[in-house]
Image: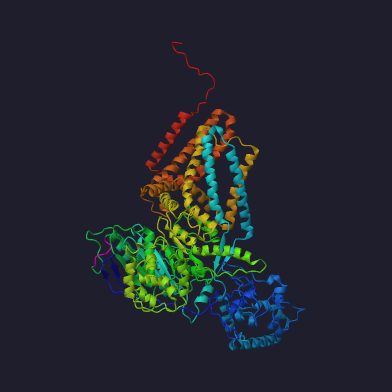
Amino acid sequence: MNGLVADSHRRNELHVMHGVDEPHPPIRRSVSKTCRVCSDEIGIKENGELFMACYECGFPVCRPCYEYERSEGNQCCPQCNTRYKRHKGCPRVHGDEEDNGNDKDGDDDFDDEFQINKNHHQYPEQTNNTNHHDINRSENGDYHPQQWHPNGPAFSSIAGSIAGKDFEGEKDIYNNVEWKERVEKWKAKQEKKGLVNKEDAEGNDQGDEDDDFLMAEARQPLWRKIPIPSSRINPYRIVIVLRLIVLCFFLRFRILTPAKDAYPLWLISVICEIWFALSWILDQFPKWFPINRETYLDRLSLRFEREGEPNKLSPVDVFVSSVDPLKEPPIITANTVLSILAVDYPVEKVSCYVSDDGASMLLFDTLSETAEFARRWVPFCKKYAIEPRAPEYYFSQKIDYLKDKVEPSFVKERRAIKREYEEFKVRINALVSKALKKPEEGWVMQDGTPWPGNNTRDHPGMIQVYLGSEGALDVEGKELPRLVYVSREKRPGYQHHKKAGAMNALVRVSAVLTNAPFLLNLDCDHYINNSKAMREAMCFLMDPQLGKKLCYVQFPQRFDGIDRHDRYANRNVVFFDINMRGLDGIQGPVYVGTGCVFNRQALYGYDPPVSEKRPKMTCDCWPSWWCCCCGGSRKSKSKSKKGSKGVFGGFYNKKKKMKNYPKKGSSPVFDLEEIEEGLEGYEELEKSSLMSQKNFEKRFGQSPVFITSTLMEEGGHPHGTNSTALIKEAIHVISCGYEEKTEWGKEIGWIYGSITEDILTGFKMHCRGWKSVYCMPKRPAFKGSAPINLSDRLHQVLRWALGSVEIFLSRHCPLWYGYGGKLKWLERLAYTNTIVYPFTSIPLLFYCTIPAVCLLTGKFIIPTLTNLASVWFLALFLSIIVTGVLELRWSGVSITDWWRNEQFWVIGGVSAHLFAVFQGLLKVLAGVDTNFTVTSKTAEDEEFGDLYLFKWTTLLIPPTTLIILNMVGVVAGVSDAINNGYGSWGPLFGKLFFAFWVIVHLYPFLKGLMGRQNRTPTIVILWSILLASIFSLVWVRIDPFLPKQTGPILKQCGVEC
């Protein structure tokens, strides 16, 4: 285990508790021109020239992919969509007959050899439409054909061009001997042309067929897009349009027919309804193009993990963030780290970085114990392929753990590892107990060294490397993934930017130490539930077409420990299974803060690579002066667009060119002048613009090592880097003054300015033109814990809403930011909805109060209904129901989850969202930071005991008051109807409907408020009764129950009458 290294900002000192010597991953060298479909090298033709599949645009495609596209695909170039012409020696496909007049090689050599009788059998493509392969196209122009069968005819695997079953009909015409003779003749001719080698032509060996099949399978797409069936999505879209039309007519009716006897109530209700309509549009239309995606992990292994070759899967750095281990139990963090170390991925390509923003010795010691237990836990997980690989959740599963287990040693080893885990938990509990009693002189490490983080607000940066290539091996003598403890430097007077600042520190540390091209971000309570989660993400990020344009792959959040009723919508199923899938069909889902695999280049603020477009064709049919005028305007327009790129647009394109030039290694790389010496082959102008020390330091900070890492798209370090020097440089990049006068938090890394930095960070990436992908594997990739009691849930929602208000009041508001970028309009609507939704709480509060006011005053917001008005009311009500039903139909969400979401939308809207609006306005406009404290009481010691745990918070007052008001209003309205006779019951039903709508939506809140055995805190009852009583007394003074008299006022005569 390597030693802890601590250093201080702007101080000439370096503390090394133990020796540190870290290896570096080898540098990736550039290769020759490769196929843009399968990433294999493009071969040469018989004349020695490079094979060119498309003569129109020259898009690089190898011959096997070209033949496979002609036989099984759409027969067109993926870039310019021009139909592929038949090359000499290639099999003929349906459609080549049209080119016979222009094709000198029109006669197919395959037909010449086999001489199939045209009168008895034609090509399957021409005669049998039912045998066509189902093709599912993806965003990158790839396709997903039906899988081939390796046991078909011998020639079915040659060059991956023809599936064996396409010739079953032809084979039936001849006997086996005649058929074999024809195959051998055809193979001999193909061998002379260089299309197959001699080994393939010697016989029909099953092993060769399998190899060819695997090669063809590896060239197929790693994923495919599965659109929602039209039978489900089209009715949904039609109802949305109809609902929009009905809504327009309904609002027109409401505006043109005011209630004159209740004008203020009518005006408020109309304003609220218009706001609700706009809010519905922002939420509904980004769900117009929902899609599903499917990955193929077997193809990923065939392509990048070939037997006998080095593993080509990209390295991944995993970030785990923690602030206070006393509030975030260390055993939970330890389980998250163990699930990462045991992930199904090459160990040398996984590094786990744990950020301790509280500089706690408790977490430091916990990771030390975790690293020791991982030596036994990781080989056990990989040997028996257990799921999940977090021990706490694996051993607590109520399933048959012997299912599918065939090795007799499993039971014995499982008992042993369970016993060791229980001992591990006891040691962690002892550490927690010790941490509760901090000594006056501060914490002291095991070697007698004072703990550098005794003052959590004033301490140096600390780095500890536990595992890795030179660290401790597991019990079987195999290498373990690297585990690194990081605590950034903190000093008084510096702005540290909370979680966003900690994540940016991890980005820099990981770039200096390992520099993996992809980053996985997890909260400390989100463990890896699916050991193949990283492979799922790599199916998209390592795709040769789509991968370069992806900024991140987002996984849905799933949670443990929630009761089956989920009364407070903690699972948030509607958002993750409906809204996010809708965004996936536009430009990609939003970043939700955890369970996300990033492209490191996107975090550096670069623009995505621009696809090479086919030049537009010109003609001579117009006069030259007309072409000059039109062409000039278009040219100027394109220039203006080119000039309006992002801050790093030009720099990124130049960096893309740099990867084809060799780089010299330096030992160690610490000076920009040394980096410049390695850029041989560059023009002087490009070198000066690219390697400008001032520009680099202004963007990334004063660390040449980190700057060098940003230029390496495939990750790794240059040759000759010294591990000890890298640790020292890593300490430097986490100093508290490193980000001063740089672009960190503005254009690079996690963006500052809001406590919901996740939304802001994803929004900036999408504005630059990046895409994101939503990956939903059958087994959830990650699982976490969620607050299940009412008070904690409201406090969580308050934090999210406050972050949205902060973004709304900042320069990054989607309403006015990024219009010169590449953000799609529906994506902008979705981001606008994420920052506007807290303001819906104001009209929602008024609208929930109106029913009670109408019942107490006897007035109503709607005048007497006509037949036409009744039709609009009924149509709107039915359209809302049908929209919900059809949405559940295509998404697969249960009606219970949908209804819980609707209920909590009202509960959160009249409580947490309302407080977030006022708190955000005070914080941004007045600089007043108001915090709502939460105090807890003891909970029941049983399953879901936290569900009945009550914590007093101010957020509970508004919804409690609304419930009491509406209940009092119902009683008052019914009493008034009883007093006034039969005629008053008709208008009463409309008022009661709205009042019951409020009560039903707030019912989960009322149930949580009462808890078990009606133990409601006195303060809640007092505040609610007080506000309700005041409102009732005001109503009695203004409009009492007694009927008003008309005519002269009669008084009782007195003595002086």
- Residue 611: x and y, percent? 54, 69
Count of residue discs = 0
Residue located 52% across and 42% down the image = 271
Please, which residue is most extreme toward the right here? 119
Dominant secondary structure of the residues highlighted in magenta in the image = loop
Residue 824 inside the magenta-drawn segment: no
Classify residue 264 as left or right of residue 943.
right
Classify residue 288 as left or right of residue 749.
right
Q: Which residues are magenta?
A: 449-454
Classify residue 996 as left or right of residue 436.
right
- Residue 677: x and y, percent? 38, 78
Between 633 and 393, which is closer to the camera in this rendering? 633
- Residue 999: x and y, percent? 50, 42
Residue 453 inside the magenta-drawn segment: yes
Between 54 and 429, which is closer to the camera in this rendering? 54
Q: How is the image coloured?
A: rainbow
- Residue 675: x and y, percent? 38, 75
Please, which residue is most extreme toward the front here? 625
| Quadrant in the rendering for residue 254 | top right
| Quadrant in the rendering for residue 179 | bottom right
Task: Work out whether 856 lies above or below 763.
Answer: above
The reply to whether residue 31 is in sight is yes
